[in-house]
Image (cartoon, rainbow, N blue to C red):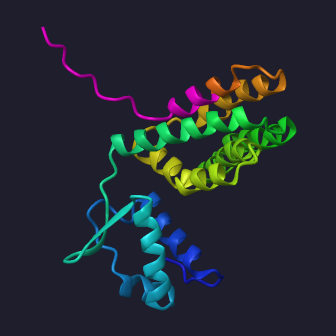
Amino acid sequence: MKPVVRAPLRDQIRQAVVDGLISGRYAPGDRIVERRVAAELGVSQAPVREALRELEALRLIESSPNRGAQVRGITEADLREVYQVRAGLEETAVRLGRPDVHALRRHLHRLQEATAGGSLTEQVRHGVGFHREIVAAAGNAVLMSVWESLGVEVWTHLSIRLFRMRPHENARDHEPLVEAFERDDPRAGAMLHDHVLAYAPAPAPTGTNH
């Protein structure tokens, strides 16, 4: 883990821990010891504690009086719940305002470049940037805050690493959305909703009672 050298410390520490989750350095059930993280990053324990609280709010770690902070076992149900909420928020955003198509095109172009270059990190960054542009266009600060609180970028990384390895389809998935916004298609919101849910693991089939 590289030492933290830039402020704000809390954000840097949170990202360092998230990188550990994404890379697999931290496995489900692993303890995250404040003192050890602080020593590795060359910081005090206070900002580490703050960062861990934020990650607990994202349901990525859990804490108990006896064991302290430890990595949660992320399930398909966890991921599905995040995407269900996110899909509803983004569909609502489209009802409140239409995004700048040129900005979407720029994100799509960068997403295509990242796909061609094989950079998963850049694919996620520009894919999330594409969706953030749509939410921001709604002009609703509460909606934006709730969407950001979902930790979309973190959950996107985890969904690809843990459940759904098809990043090269990501750029193609966004093209119909841009075209729908370009022609001011009234179905754009529903298309966006379905697009987001397509990234969530399908629920397990239930038995049929006879």
Quarter of the picture containing the C terminus is top left
Picture coordinates of residue 24 (x, y %)? 40, 60
Of residues 63 and 154, the one drawn nearer to the viewer in this rendering: 63
Residue depicted at 63% across the width and 33% down the height: 91
Task: Determine the image quadrant of residue 87.
Answer: top right
Magenta range is: 192-210
Picture coordinates of residue 68 (x, y %)? 27, 76
Residue depicted at 64% across the width and 47% down the height: 128
Of residues 150 and 76, the one drawn nearer to the viewer in this rendering: 150
- The prevailing secondary structure element of the residues shown in magenta is loop
Q: Name above or below for residue 155 compared with residue 17.
A: above
Quick one: which residue is furthest to the left in this view? 210
Q: Name above or below for residue 54 compared with residue 137.
A: below
Picture coordinates of residue 127 (x, y %)? 66, 44
Q: How many marks?
A: 0
Residue depicted at 54% across the width and 69% down the height: 15
